[in-house]
Image: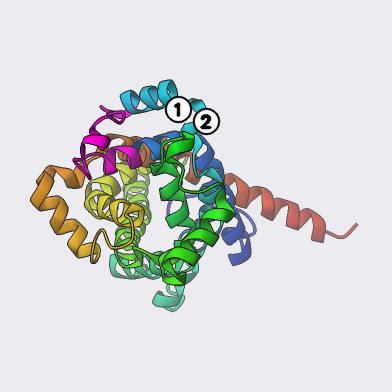
Amino acid sequence: MVGFKPTDVPPTAAVKFIGAGTAACIADLFTFPLDTAKVRLQIQGETKSSANMKCAQYKGVFGTISTMVKTEGPRSLYNGLVAGLQRQMSFASVRIGLYDSVKQFYTKGSEHVGIGSRLLAGCTTGAMAVAIAQPTDVVKVRFQAQANVSSSRRYKGTMDAYKTIAKEEGVRGLWKGTAPNITRNALVNCTELVTYDLIKDSLLKSNLMSDNLPCHFTSAFGAGFCTTVIASPVDVVKTRYMNSAKGQYQSALNCALTMLRKEGPHAFYKGFMPSFLRLGSWNVVMFVTYEQLKRAMMSARVSWEAPV
């Protein structure tokens, strides 16, 4: 990535692949409650039935977290964590771990990397990651959306969710919402990785910061904000569509139009604050951890291969 201090031995594609997945899992452990709060806020107002109106109403990020803890217990904040970790190991490994390799492929090994090549690499790895990890995302969202009480549980556990969805909705049900998810993650990947590269590169070239933690923090946080602004509308549609019952929406586009008609344009930015807090903090934890893991693994490899 641009701005990282080079090591004596550059990390291999395998090291980046494993490091990205591991770092993303660590970041998820810290930020998962914010992601769960985001999902609850995004689906709120989806139906206006009297039964739904009696359910807990969420207001703001910390209000949502507080309400969930009071009504469902602290463990509810980590509903879907197993599927979330499965998602990151298969998802982040591809979209982040293979980003540099795909970027080099498009530039044919040239040292000069234009913004077009960066965007193309981001779109490519983002789409590849969704195609592989979509079932884990569907299960994660459904667990986060369900209230942590016995009467509201749709699935007994993670494996039961995979089996039940495949049985009731067909194998295609596990890839529900793939189109909006590819769109979302192409946007997220491009904005997150490219913006991170550009912000860090600018800070270093202008000598405003050196290659250290404050620079990493600023670049990652800026990338998180830009990503949230651009990807939030698609993210809300993706969450609603993935969580919907069979036949509730004809397509992702129908879901978006239904939201616009019933709730207005502001519905596309429901859960914006938890999305921003989550992406900002997730980026900081992930990028810092990712770089340290790469260096640690390459150092271990060099030590292992060194002659005794």
Residues at circles 2 and 1 in contact by the CB criterion of under 8 Å: yes
Mark 2 nearby-residue class (10 Å; few <14, some 14–19, many ≥20): few
Q: Is residue 20 magenta?
A: no
Occupied quadrant, residue 208: top left
Residue at left offset 31%, top offset 67%: 179
Residue shown at 21% from the left, 35% from the top? 50
Q: Position of residue 290 (x, y in %)?
A: 55, 48
Q: Is residue 167 above or below residue 264?
A: below
Query: Residue placed farthest to the bottom in the image?
Result: 108
Q: Relative to 61, say whether 157 is above or below.
A: below
| Element marked by disc 1 | helix
Q: Provide the secondary structure element on which disc 2 rests.
A: helix
Going 37% across and 47% down the picture, which residue do you hit?
200
Q: Looking at the image, what colour scheme do you see? A: rainbow
Image side of residue 10 versus residue 84, left or right: right
Quadrant of the drawing holding the C terminus: bottom right
- Residue under pointer 1: 72
Q: Inspect the image, locate mark 1, and give the three-letter code of the amino acid beneath it.
A: Glu
Question: Residue 197 placed where, x, y %?
Answer: 37, 53
Can residue 162 be seen here?
yes
Q: For residue 41: magenta?
A: yes
Residue placed under numbered mark 2 in the picture: 75
- Out of 73 and 111, give the one closest to the viewer: 73
In front here: 164 or 113? Answer: 164
In magenta, the rendered stretch is: 38-61
Q: Position of residue 156 (x, y in %)?
A: 55, 46
